[in-house]
Image (cartoon, grey):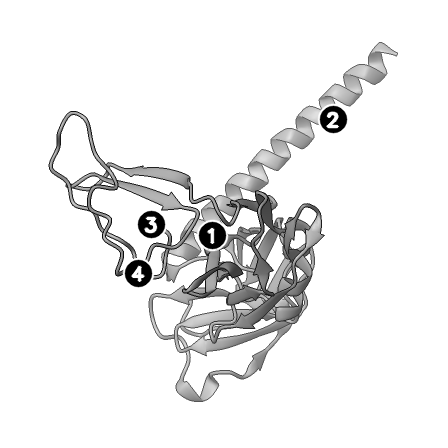
Amino acid sequence: MKKLLSLLLLTALLFSCNSEKKRAIQEKKNKEAEVFMAQTIKGNLLTTDEISIRFVDELVKDEDLNKPLDAKIFSFRPRIKGSAYWKTTSTLAFKPAAPLKYKKTYKGKLDFRILKCAQLPDSLTIYTFDFNITGRNIEAYKGDFQLKNSNSPKFFNFQGEVTFSEVTTLEEVQKCVHFKSDNNTVAMKFEPKQDKRSFSFKSDEITRDNDTHVFKLTIDKDILGMENDFEKSYQMTPIDDMRITGINYVTSTKNPKIRIEFSDELSQEQDINGLISLSPMTEFKLQKRNGERF
């Protein structure tokens, strides 16, 4: 039993030493190859990104661009189907046949022996790299209640805009974005923007009554491959009760500001002087934001 254990330990030690030796050899090969590279493959990529390496010098002629190369020039784990080609005279690219999977780490190899580029030395053999596919993120979001008619505080729409970090389809947005009040879904209409990442939205008409209602806008992380669910709450106060619904302090600028949000939109013609006072006495300026409740 002791002999078997010793043999196993020795085998594991030899395997570890062999692995470290192989890793050191490959690191040396990578450094030799990177001398000829202006930009390598590192870090995070989007699901629709091409995988490319830009070399310092021009390695092919214009007539060689956009022509399919041997796909085996690149290899990946997990496997990625696609095609290799010269994107520019100095940029070698691999275009995946389908969007890559979110939250995955890929390991890749570039085989110079298959590439057979006369401008590069024969000593270059294999270059290894790895990259991550991150989850989709929300880059920008805004949303609020808007009066349908400035003369009536009873009828509203909820509207705004959301921008994702990657191309997103209208169908995906319709499935993952929900707007509810008291567990009742409020229908929303979405309009895609030209960048295919941004969408404006507008709810059906919302009638304001004599009760306080809490609305929630949620975006489901699973459908979009995001790290976390997105959720934002909004309060609609009774129709006969104008309230302060939020106070934000902006102190990072040269002139500090206090942003006060009301439950109702303030008319631009309304005189608000004297509405707010500070103690101790401090000189300040009141300003209404057009079309908003600030």
Residue at x 58% of width, y 58% of height: 207
Residue 128, percent across and down? Answer: 54, 53
Q: Do the residues labelled 3 and 2 touch (CB within 8 Å)?
A: no
Residue 49, percent across and down? Answer: 53, 65
Spatial separation of the CA atoms under disc 2 and disc 1:
34 Å
User: Tag 3: residue type?
Assistant: Phe
Query: Label 3, on which residue?
Result: 294
The image quadrant of residue 201 is bottom right
- Which label lies toward us, 2 or 1? 1
Task: Give the mark nearer the N terminus: 1 vs 4.
Answer: 1
Spatial separation of the CA atoms under disc 4 and disc 2:
75 Å
Spatial separation of the CA atoms under disc 1 and disc 4:
46 Å
10 Å neighbourhood of mark 3: few (<14), some, or many (≥20)? Answer: some
Element assignment for label 3: loop
10 Å neighbourhood of mark 1: few (<14), some, or many (≥20)? Answer: few
User: Tag 4: residue type?
Assistant: Asn
Can you tell which mark lies on residue 11?
A: 2
- Which label lies toward us, 4 or 2? 4
Element assignment for label 4: loop
